[in-house]
Image (cartoon, rainbow, N blue to C red):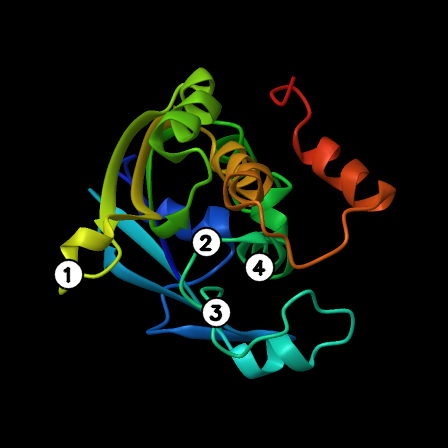
């Protein structure tokens, strides 16, 4: 599963400060359900892109205690889901919570941001996707995918490549994705109890209503 975030704010490389991740060739973070990788395919003063690659281990998913997933073959390694939200909270926690010691004012500054999600499973299709995100000011481009190119009669899949553009703070973008991607996917790997609801509401303050 791949998420990229691009900005043309200048100097665009300030994105690295906001994410608290330097421009090393690639940084890797172990997770209980796989591995997260962060790298910058483009980093200049005019344009900077941060890429987040989530490599989910399907065997670990099945063997985890209290896991809702019981089959080794599933779509979880390939789609943006609640696993992405958990991963972001672990290795992008400071950016998610709007903290930046080096550039505190920039963390509060709206900037042009483009997010690309490859891919997102969306219950309700493109209509539901836009109903959720357009009220937050996003310009949305959606590319649908057929189930199998060899068998076009099977029709379209529920998976989409999604481009989102907005002029907002980085923490706002991350919070929107943190809360709403599991809503769109609607197949959470954890039990949603009161504690989890309160966490989602905290990240949704000032915009979720």
- The tag earlier along the polypeptide, 1 or 2, is 2
* Secondary element at tag 1: loop
Contact between marks 3 and 2 (CB within 8 A): the answer is no
Q: What's the residue at 63%, 78% (across, down)? A: 62
CA distance separating discs 3 and 1: 19 Å
Identity of the residue furthest to the right in this view? 194
Residue 156, above or below 37: above
- The tag earlier along the polypeptide, 4 or 1, is 4
Between residues 139 and 17, which one lies in front from this camera angle?
A: 139
CA distance separating discs 2 and 4: 7 Å
- The tag earlier along the polypeptide, 3 or 2, is 3
Residue 55, given in percent of the width and then of the height, sits at 45, 72
Residue 48, above or below 41: above
CA distance separating discs 1 and 2: 22 Å
CA distance separating discs 3 and 4: 14 Å
Q: Residues within 10 Å of mark 4 (few under 14, many from 20)?
A: many
Residue 65, given in percent of the width and then of the height, sits at 77, 75
* Secondary element at tag 4: helix
Residue 123, given in percent of the width and then of the height, sits at 46, 39
Quarter of the figure with the C terminus: top right
* Secondary element at tag 2: loop
Q: Residues within 10 Å of mark 3 (few under 14, many from 20)?
A: few
The residue indicated by pointer 2 is 80
CA distance separating discs 3 and 2: 13 Å
Contact between marks 3 and 1 (CB within 8 A): the answer is no
The residue indicated by pointer 1 is 149
Residue 72, above or below 40: below
The residue indicated by pointer 4 is 83
The residue indicated by pointer 3 is 74
């Amino acid at each position: 599963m791949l998420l990229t975030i691009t900005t043309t704010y200048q100097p665009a490389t300030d994105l690295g400060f906001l994410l608290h991740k330097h421009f090393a060739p690639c940084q890797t973070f172990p997770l209980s359900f796989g591995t997260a990788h962060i790298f910058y395919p483009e980093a200049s003063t005019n344009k900077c892109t941060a890429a987040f690659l989530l490599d989910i281990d399907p065997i670990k998913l099945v063997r985890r205690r209290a896991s809702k997933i019981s089959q080794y073959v599933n779509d979880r390694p390939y789609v943006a889901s609640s696993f992405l939200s958990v991963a972001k909270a672990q290795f992008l926690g400071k950016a998610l919570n709007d903290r930046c010691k080096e550039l505190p004012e920039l963390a509060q500054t709206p900037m042009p941001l483009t997010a690309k999600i490859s891919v997102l499973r969306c219950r309700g299709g493109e209509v539901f996707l836009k109903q959720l995100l357009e009220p937050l000011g996003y310009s949305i481009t959606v590319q649908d995918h057929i189930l199998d190119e060899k068998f076009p009669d099977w029709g379209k899949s529920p998976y989409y490549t999604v481009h989102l553009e907005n002029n907002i703070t980085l923490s706002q973008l991350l919070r929107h994705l943190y809360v709403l991607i599991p809503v769109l996917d609607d197949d959470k790997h954890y039990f949603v109890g009161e504690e989890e609801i309160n966490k989602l509401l905290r990240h949704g303050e000032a915009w979720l209503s």
